[in-house]
Structure formats: C-alpha cells, structure tokens
Amino acid sequence: MQSSTLSVGFKAKRAVVSTSLLALGVAFEIVSKHAKELKEELKYWQDGLVISLGVLNGPIITFKNDGGEIKYLGKGIKGNPDLTIYFKNVDSAFMTFTGQMGSYTAFVQHRALLHGNVGQAMQASRAMAIVQTYLMPGLIFDKLFKRAPKLSASQLALKARVMATLTPLMIAKAGK
Amino acid sequence: MYIPDYYEYACPVKIVSGLKALSNLPYEMDQLGTHRALIVTDRGVVGAGLIDIVKAAFEGSNCEIGDIYDQTPPDSSKSVVNQVAKLYISSKCDCFVAVGGGSSMDTAKCANMIVTEGTDDLMQFQGAERLKKPMEPFVAIPTTAGTGSEVTLAAVIYDDEAQIKLAFTSYQLLPKVAILDPKMTLTLPPKITAATGMDALTHAIEAFYCLQKNPVSDSFAIAAIKLIAEYLPKCVEKGDDENDRLAMANAALLAGISFSNSMCGVVHSLAHACGGVARVPHGVANAVLLPWGMENNLDKVGDIIAELAPILGAPLSGGSMDRAKAAIKAVRDLTKKLHDLCGLPTTLREANVEESQLETIARATINDGAATYNPEDVTYESALDMLKKAF
C-alpha cells in the first residue's frame, strides 16, 4: 500500500510506535550502564546476543548485548538477529508502548510473535520490563506488570537521569 | 462465566473416539489423500502389543504401513527427530501416524516440520507462530492419558547440550485426526496411568486459571477435571475397564484442547525445568508441583481457583479463599491416594531430585515460556521457594 493512501490515524500511531522503539533502545543503553538489577539480569545473557524488536511490516529496532551492556544498533533489522520479537500489527504495538497493556499481556494475547529461543526471549522480556520501570510513570505500573515494582531512592534518581538525558540522546541516535 | 478482553482459539482436529475407533485409521488416511504411513512409536508400545493392533487396522484397506520408527526415547531430541524425518522421506511415506505418549507425538510433529520445510535444522523454527506452510498429514493415536499432545499446538524436545527443553508452538503442528481407542491405554501400568493422568489434570487446572482463560477453554477444562476426578483413581486401581480408560483418554484430550488455547503457567514451567535439569518424568513433576503452583496463585486468582472446589469434590463451606484452599487440598488428597495405590511420588525428593539441583531448576523455570501465562509474577526467588516446599 502506498504511504500516501494510509490514514492520518494510522500514520500517527506508527509514528508513536517508531518513537517509542527509539526511546526503548536508547533507554536500554543508559539503564544497562547504571541499573544494578539490569546488570544482574544481563549477566545471564549470551554475550553478543542480537535482538530485533518491532512490528511486522513496520518499524523495528535492533540492539545487542555487548559484554553485559546493551548497545542500540539502530532502526531496522541489523545483521542476523538471534531473536526477533514482532508485534503482529501497529495497533498491538501502540497499545503496549503507550502503557495500555503490559508486554506480557501482548504475548499472552497472541499479539506478538517470537522467532528464536524461548528462554532468551524470557530473558529479554524481563530486561525490557526493567527498562520500562525507568521510562513509564509509576501510576500505570499496575497495568504494565503482574507485580508493580517499588523503586528505591537510587532507582528514582536514575529514572530522573534517564528522563533528563533521553530526548537529546534520541535526537542524536535518530538517524542510526 | 469469565469473558476476557481478547482471546484466540483454534482446534481443527477431527476426534474419533470409542469402540474400535482404530479400525477407522485407513479411512481417515484415505480422506486425507494419503495411503502410506510412517508409524512413529517407542519400544514400550511395541512391547505392549499395541502396534499389532494398529497393523491389524490396515487389513483389507487400500492403505499400508510404509515403515515403523520404534526407537523414540522418553525425551525426544534433535537427532531422533532428524532420523524420523529421513525415514519418512526414504520410505516414501505420505502420512505421519504417531502411536504413543507425548514423546512420540512431539517427535512426529518436529519431524513433520523438518520434512515440510525441507531442512535438517529444527532450531530455525524455535519460537511461537513461525510456521506458515501446511504440514504433511498427521494422525495421532495416544497410548497414554495423557499429555493431550494429539490436540495441542506445542511440541517439546530435549536439547542434550544445553540441558533444556525446547518448545515450538504453531497452529500448523496440530494433527488432522486424533483417534482415541480404549484398547490403546488398557495395558498402561498403574504408576504411568497415575502420572499421565496428573499431567492431564494439571493442564486442565492451569488452563482454567491462567491468563488466557476463555469461555471455550474453560468448558473443556471443567469437563476434563470432572472426568479425571472420577476416573483416574479407578484406572490406577483397576485399569482393565475399557469404559474407564476411554473416559480418561477423553479427559486428557479435553485437557489438551483447553491448555493448547489457554496455555499453562508456573506448574509447567517448574515441571519443564525439573525435566530438563533432573530428568523427572513430566507427569510426576506436575503431580508433585501442582498444589504448590496453585497456592502460588491464590493471591491473584483465588476466586477462580475456588470455582474448582465443587468440580474436585471439595467442601463448599466458607468464603472464596476457603474454597480455593479446599480445592488445593482436594488435589493433595488425590495425589496422596495415587501414592498409596501405586507409589506415585508426592515430593521432589521422592522423584529423585537432589537438593543441590534446586537452584539450577529455579533458574531454568523463569526462562520457561509458560511462566508468561501465570497470573502471579514468577521470579527466581518464588520459583526456588516453591521447589523447596515441594522437596
């Protein structure tokens, strides 16, 4: 379908999903450098693991485990990912990234597909949930997680730092 | 009845159940446009004389057995799957017929993937909903009651190197036909009857309270639980009644349909991990862990678990939480009864798990996909806690 025939509403949702993916990728980098609980989770990841996350026929990002820190590799599928997680459509991705449902709900409701090892996908899912605690407002944690995490003072301070640096870093990496 | 915001359901399998059902095998193959079967089975099934019953079903028909693979181990592996796929092709078969328990069924499903996709690398298809091509025709004939694999979209095999179980899920993996003939489970020994029956009960109970519960799967789950509560002890105590065996075969199938669509939760995550790390048979692990998994979910879905009380024959006095606890007690009473009848383990220690393995099992549990569907958050700490209690 030609881009010019897509509705304004669809293009807007797709733009929100695309921006959310960029935010997630950049935040993943920042949080993996500083958050103890994410470093602990990444200890068990295969070094060099490459993951792509996005929408079937839509926006996708790729990131990599680089010695226990996440490196955002950019938009699109880069190389041969070990694991790819696709939302079946923009609507499902939009609901997840705007906090209307948790990512676990998206999986449970068959709104996402998985190409790759289920065990690695579970690791990725836990790690992304940690990143979401630094991106999303605490008010909607009950919708996003089975048990809403309570952030400590140091985690709240890191969250403030993530929020403050996110936009400039997203602008810097938007072209990647 | 609970109606979720969203759910998906599929079960296109034709079910052929009852007296002399196996005689219809050639007809069902013919309806699928096939005439030359590869039988996938194991030595135990052969030794019990069940393959002779299958062979007899072909007499006077225009279908034949192309070959028989009877080396399926209790936990199928990548190498076994590749052997079966090669045999299917070299023997010019056009239909997989799995005769056995979950291992034979899952082996046939995975071999079917290899043949259909024209590859020898099963690992390419790991994940969920990856398969698009219609698969080779597949008829499933269970000899346990059971995994329900004859009606599920999942296949699980063992990766020897990584010591984990690998899961594949796709609607394409569903057989075309499932044949339930009571003769096929008549000779099942009491302990295996008990373990496989508890596997079926776990499927039904977890499907009833896990996150994708829906009115369709609930209907099947309730029917399965009722049948298991009534017929499992009978089949363990005195398994020579064909009607009782047919009831359990149907229970396992109903439980399979239920969990294939609603999925399972932490009990299956723990059981898969116990199987992968400590080689505990799947049904045994489920029997031991089911009450602990139900307790783990009391806070989130106690009101749903409470609905199981009358179905399990538990007392209905008290509030919702009392009935939920009564339902869990009913499960414990059932496993105790089965333990007394045939020695079915009720603890992980009795199932030959070593205490030193619990931490590794807990780590494997949180990486099992079934944990996603569990209502309560499954963490390493909560998994280890349940394992220690079950030990």
Image (cartoon, coloured by chain):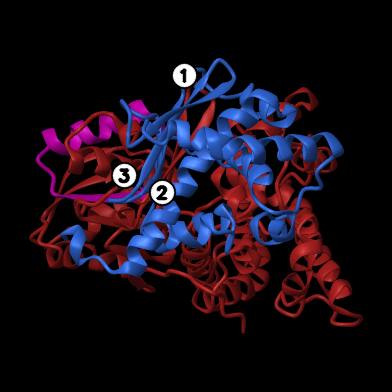
What quarter of the picture does the N terminus of chain B occupy?
A: bottom right
- Percent across and percent down for residue B261 are 47, 64
The chain that hosts pointer 2 is A
Which residue was labeled with disc 3?
Answer: B108
Report in which chain the residue with disc 1 lies.
A
Q: Which residue is mark 1?
A: A48
Dot 1 and dot 2 within a common chain: yes
Other-residue count near label 1 (Cα within 10 Å), few / some / many at <14 / 14–19 / ≥20: some
User: Identity of the amino acid at label 2?
Assistant: Ser
How far apart in space, not on screen, are marks 3 and 2 (Cα)?
Answer: 41 Å
Q: Is residue B191 above or below residue B165?
A: below
Q: Amino acid at mark 1?
A: Gly
Disc 3 is attached to a residue of which chain?
B
A65 is higher (above) or lower (below) than B37: above
Q: Which chain is red?
A: B
Label 1: state its secondary structure. loop
| Crowding at mark 3 (Cα within 10 Å: few <14, some 14-19, many 20+) | many
Query: Which amino acid, mark 3?
Result: Ala
Identify the hue of chain A: blue
Instruction: Give the number of the disc on residue A18.
Output: 2
Residue B10 picture quarter: bottom left
